[in-house]
Image: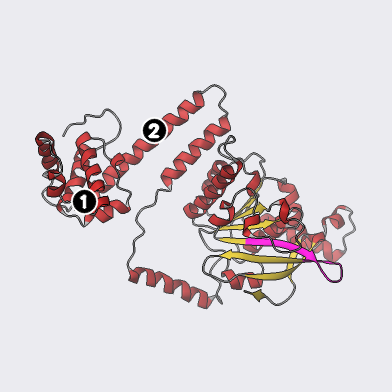
Amino acid sequence: MTNSVGLKPHDADAEAGLLACIGKNTEHWADALERGFCEEWFMEPINTKIASKMIENDNAGWEVDDVTIALAFRDESERADVFHVFDSVQTTGHFKLFLEKVEGAWLKRKAIDACHGIIEMACEDGSRAPEVVERGGEQFSKLSLKEKSKLRTGAEVMSKTWENIKLRQETGGMNGIPTGLKTLDSMTCGWQNSDLIVLAARTSVGKTALSIELALSALRARKTVQYFSLEMMNEAVMERMLANTSEVPVRVMVDKVMTEGQTDAVEQAKNFLSGANLYMEDAGDMSVATIRAKARKLARTGLDMIVVDYCQIVRPEDIRAPREQQVAGIVWGLKALAKELKIPIIMLSQVNRNAADTNQCPKLSDLADSDRVGRDADLVLMLWKKDGKDGKEEHFVELVKQRNARLGCIPVEFKKSIQAFEEKQKKFLN
């Protein structure tokens, strides 16, 4: 069969071979559907028509075998062409090879289309370079994240499940990155790969300080952490890390009134932070595409966790879209990145102003700008405070969402001078 559709990548023989394999052995139909089988996979007109008829029959509950499909074509000349396609192979032994070739050619065509779209956008009068780059990053990310079949046997799943249980037995239940809060570790087993963790709080409650605490805990466990600070300069974040690690307030360092013990503690903290696997970014105009590109580059040499401070000031892909859609796109992008790199990502978020004076834990519905923030997250932590009986503020870290696991409230003490959080008392679980 000749190439009659121009220069776009496709393999007419592989297309016919794939359809013939399915037609001769319909057990392959489920495998094809799991990979995303669709009309767009095919470039030859007759192959497109056959694929369309197979999908139509399947949706109607009818058979997709070669005879049924061929007889569905009433035009005799067209029916002859269909039988010719189904006769293109004698056995179905090369089904997987045909599947890979046809799907691969389709992905190449999608990549070419994406490139053309980016070129057109770049050539438009008034288009902004960052928006063009963002659109390109989004398009290619979607292609690279196209999921293959995840179907596994029960025995395979059981084997992996038991490995995880044994690991947690050996580590006291911990099989993820330590959070730094003992009770939170017992509730989550540590931060898990591919999870998007939302840390939310009202303004000036201490969410950046807590994110630093979480990052430091990972660094102490010899993990590699990438910290994206979109609001504060790297040096300001490092000051807080230095104070937290040394337990010496920055004001004491600046005023040169440190004791000998404090001087030693600061030197030890400096050495630890200088030698830790910590990478920091503080550009204020970062998009998800920028974060993705930098994270992918670092992941080539090893990356265990990302912190993004914070969601609402990540630059959206489309500045003209409604705010809810902008934030939803940011959340989806970071969730996709966590899955792609198979690492936890901690994303900070604001809560709505109407939750500012309630003196109680904010709800998932209080997350700012979009309900997708809470809906797409795997875990949601709320950092909140209330007025205590003695007039002092009481702080709490509350786990308000965790898929199929425990929720609860952890009383903590916030030592503002050194930007550190410590658990106050025994845990309270729901």
Q: Residue at the location (62% across, 56% down)?
A: 365
Q: Would you call the spot at circle 1 few (<14 residues within 10 Å), some (14-19), or many (20 or more)?
A: many
The residue lying toward the viewer, choosing from 62 and 26, is: 62
Main secondary structure of the magenta stretch: strand
Looking at the figure, which quarter contains the C terminus? Answer: bottom right
Task: Determine which of the numbered discs, if any, sits on residue 305 in the image.
Answer: none
Color scheme of the displayed model: secondary structure
Foreground residue among 216 and 340: 340
Residue at the image position 66 percent from the left and 41 percent from the top: 283
Q: Is residue 384 magenta?
A: yes
Amino acid type for the residue under numbered disc 2: Asp
Rendered image quadrant of residue 259: bottom right
Q: Which mark is residue 95?
A: 1
Point out residue 4 in the picture as x, y percentages from the top left corner.
Answer: 21, 29
> Which quarter of the rendering shows the N terminus?
top left
Element assignment for label 2: helix
In the shown orientation, is residue 202 left or right of residue 392?
left
Tag 2 or tag 1, which sits nearer the N-term?
A: 1
Residue extending furthest toward the top: 125
Instruction: Please provide percent x and percent y for residue 251.
Output: 86, 55
> In x, y percent, where is residue 368?
65, 50
Instruction: Say if 288 sits above or below 45 in the image.
Output: below
Secondary structure beneath disc 1? helix
Front residue (pair 287, 298): 287
Q: Which residues are magenta?
A: 381-394
Q: Circle 2 sits on which residue?
A: 113
Residue 342 visible, this orientation: yes
The three-letter amino acid code for the residue at tag 1 is Phe
